[in-house]
Image (cartoon, rainbow, N blue to C red):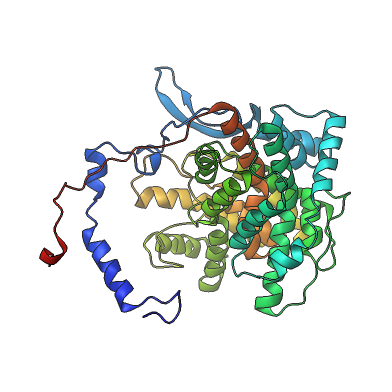
Amino acid sequence: MPRNSSEITPYIEALASLSNEAHSITTEMYYEHDVKRGLRDLNGNGVVAGLTEISQIQNKIVGADGELLPCAGELYYRGINVRELVAGATEEKRHAFEECAYLLLTSRLPNSEELREFTSTLGAYRNLPSSFVRDIILKAPGKNMMNILSRSVLALYAYDENPDDISIPNVLRQCIALIAQFPILAVYGYQSYQHYHNGQSLFIHYPKPEYDTAENLLHILREDGKFTKLEADLLDLALVLHMEHGGGNNSTFTTHVVSSSGTDTYSAVAAALGSLKGPRHGGANIKVVQMFDDMKREIDTTSEEEIRNYLVRLLDKQAFDKAGLIYGMGHAVYSISDPRAQILEKYAYQLSVEKGMESEYQLYKTVARLAPEIIASKRKMYKGVSPNVDFFSGLVYRMLGLPEELYTPIFAVARIAGWSAHRIEELQCAGKIIRPAYIAVKPITSYIPLDKRD
């Protein structure tokens, strides 16, 4: 018998072996039945599962002969190019996360008064319920920030006087509150983890009403509560670039699937968080910085030849985690370029100068230049490969001094705005539960009485 619930006993091992032996689905069977694994074809095109007005990705154009051709990637929020949203806010010397959240939720850009009122509303919702930090976060500290965040979101259900009402006004209220509270939940969960598991001093800073999302996150995270303007600008930019990416990404699709059942907002968001926690979705930028740390330990990073050889060894499963991947390179949708990576790279250089980390920035640039060429020479590819947003976001977070444990929660701090917009859209438009089909391939057999089984 198991001594504790986490112990894998010989009996469990034996059951696992039975399960593995019984598994007979092969890769060839997916082609035989024309099943799109991962809901994507060989060219990376997703199976169409719905309609959305929230965001759009452009990665192909129609050629002269009508053939679809790869093009530089573009991303649109409610029809507006994200490059324009970033450029407009930068030119006016202000942050863009709040106005982009308003845009995603309402389908229009706010005027000055609307933006002021929306920002003020977010500020009013940032304070957590009375005793919530003590009873939910500090009394049960966890070791994984995403699990802490999920648990906190589910706990908020009990503090909501009308949690199951899925009318649009009530869901919008819940979503605005979660957008405001996510930075607080993420950072307080991290502070609890640092104190109870790593023996660090515990400090809890309250959010400031005059600070926006990016500023408050840096303020409550740092012991002295201080940050530079450029630091806040870069974090705001990263939040804007991560807040939405079409309905087809795993966590947003999860939001649609769970919302279609008619469940409450907290359950839907917790499900999306569970999806984002997976290393194939939300944890890629952690792998990027860890890969670069390993590279700096193993080779002379001033030598382009040694960098090239290291990248080859990565693909040959002879370096870092031996997974055969160059992390931060390639994307399920983009081929020629990821617009988010291009935008972030431009501003990352400014931060590298402020932090005295130009050499680190140049190393990333070198890998970004060499990796596509090396991948193309060693892999059969159906589309091009280029740096994705995780490649440079990991560098930005490292320069900002953000702990790796918070990389994925900060992704969630941004993406909750997109999830919220998609949940509302699902409730407004669908009316049917999402129920995909699976082809059964196990032969039909007869029941065997218990006393006649081997």
User: Above or below — where is 317 with respect to 25?
Assistant: below
Q: Nearer the viewer, residue 230 or 32?
A: 32
Name the residue located 75 percent from the left edge and 61 percent from the top edge: 132
Residue 182 is left or right of residue 207, and the answer is left
Name the residue located 13 percent from the left edge and 64 percent from the top edge: 453
Please count the marks in the image: 0
Name the residue located 42 percent from the left edge and 52 percent from the top edge: 374
Location of residue 102 in the rendering, given as x and y in whole percent from the top left corner: 74, 34
User: Above or below — where is 131 with respect to 67?
Assistant: below
Residue 277's image quarter? bottom right
State the quadrant of the C terminus.
Answer: bottom left
| Residue 65 visible | yes
Residue 414 is left or right of residue 338, and the answer is right
User: Above or below — where is 344 with respect to 421?
Assistant: below
Location of residue 214 in the rendering, given as x and y in whole percent from the top left corner: 77, 51
Residue extending farthest to the top is 65
